[in-house]
Image: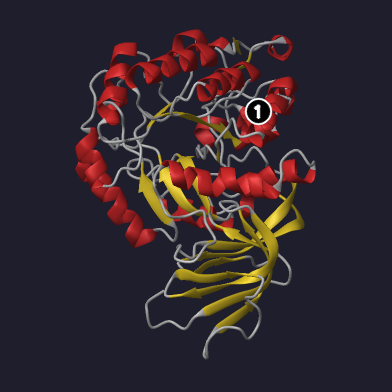
Amino acid sequence: MNAFSPPQLFYNARIVDPASGRDQHGGVLVRAGLIIDVGPHVIAGSGPEGTLETDCKGHALAPGLVDLRAFIGEPGAEHRETLKTASEAAAAGGVTTIVCMPETNPPIDEPAIVDFVLRRARDTAIVHVHPAAALTKDLAGRELTEIGLLQEAGAVAFTDGMRSVTNAQVMRRALTYARDFDALIINHVEDPDLVGQGVMNEGARASLLGLHGIPREAETIMLERDIRLARLTGARYHAAMISCADSVEIVRRAKESGLPVTCGVSINNLTLNEIDIGDYRTFMRLSPPLRNEDDRQAVIEALADGVIDVIVSDHNPQDVETKRQPFAEAANGALGLETMLSAGLRLVEAEQVTLPRLLNALSSRPAGLIGLPGGHLAAGKPADIIILDIDFPYVVDKVKLHSRSKNSPFDEARLSGRVLKTFIAGRLVYEYNEQ
């Protein structure tokens, strides 16, 4: 919104601000794209003359979500997803900021490509898009990229996406280099040699299905190594996604010792387990794999008590050719932007996580990690906000999803919680329209 737009007042809302812990009835006043007032005193008619008013009808009003991990095909694989279609899916899911991974063609490993993504997003995307740059050139895990120049160009974090940096010396150099720029290093904690031919969690279920398993140690060994290197260098380190109880304890110990270590979890590992693979459902082939129920409960508890910092969609569109294969030959990845919040609300409904805690991991905490101003409902903050009906029941229909690809693990699942409206800087970019 420009400076000449009339003020907007959202009233009769359940104000949920995870940054401050506020959860109360009230309203929000917006002017020129910024929040200028929030609280129970913001009611209908309390704005200045000419204010546009929106009755939230008691629904939740919260900051837009910030997704730290989304794979978008543009440039190079626009048949899977574009910045435009990804942003439309994000807006429908209440995500107002996307951090896109560098696994494009060419990869985001040069300042010029960072600039291209930012310009392309400004032209076509309806939500904020920030690129994460490659940690190593060509994502090959050998030669470091120019972290300082990439950060100056607009990269908000550094990662090789789905590829783990397996060389410990390279990771040590990356952390040392990044420390001087206060840059965030994100690593996919999975040892490819231990993964081998594995395609799902190692255990009785894999044996029953006749599939090669992936041991938890593929994750924990890489995580333990990275945390020791973070201790050695003093750099900020973020484990992209953890998925098992052993990893939770490793991160817990690191935090208790005061290391600048954070971690994320995929919405898939929070809400699904290996049983959901069912009869070789390839939309459930993921990295990290879906674990058993004990591990799922462990990561839920870690989210509730703050050991896990952020929830990510791990949005990874795949076309029909890469998913309509035997399970062992299908590509990893699933859609996530549009269903992440609704799936997370399962945990709220089960009283395993509070709504403010869920939204903290989905908005204010990830925004803080990469230094963005989103994730707050407070005066002076951007009016990137959503109106959410947390009790709205619906069945996921992949045909109606906004993403170009349709590989949703929640296809035909019953979910509750629908984003009714999404605003970017006070401008409406999405409104639910039942068809």
In this view, the residue in front, 423 or 177, is 177
Question: Going by the image, does 362 lie left or right of 149?
Answer: right
Q: Is residue 396 visible?
A: no
Position of residue 293 relative to residue 26, above or below, is: above
Mark 1: secondary structure:
helix
- Rendering coords of residue 110 (x, y %): 22, 38
Is residue 399 visible from the viewing direction of this image? Answer: yes
* Residue drawn at x 78%, y 46% as measured from the top left: 349
Residue furthest bottom in the image: 49
Relative depth, front residue between 111 and 55: 55
Q: Quadrant of residue 12?
A: bottom right
Tag 1: amino acid: Val
Name the outermost residue toward the right. Answer: 350
Above or below: residue 172 compared with residue 395: above
Q: Which residue is mark 1?
A: 299
Percent from the top left, x then y, of residue 133?
31, 37
Query: What residue lies at 41% left-to-right and 21% top-to-bottom?
Result: 164
Callout 1: 10 Å neighbours few (<14), some, many (20+)? many
Q: Position of residue 281 (x, y in %)?
A: 67, 29
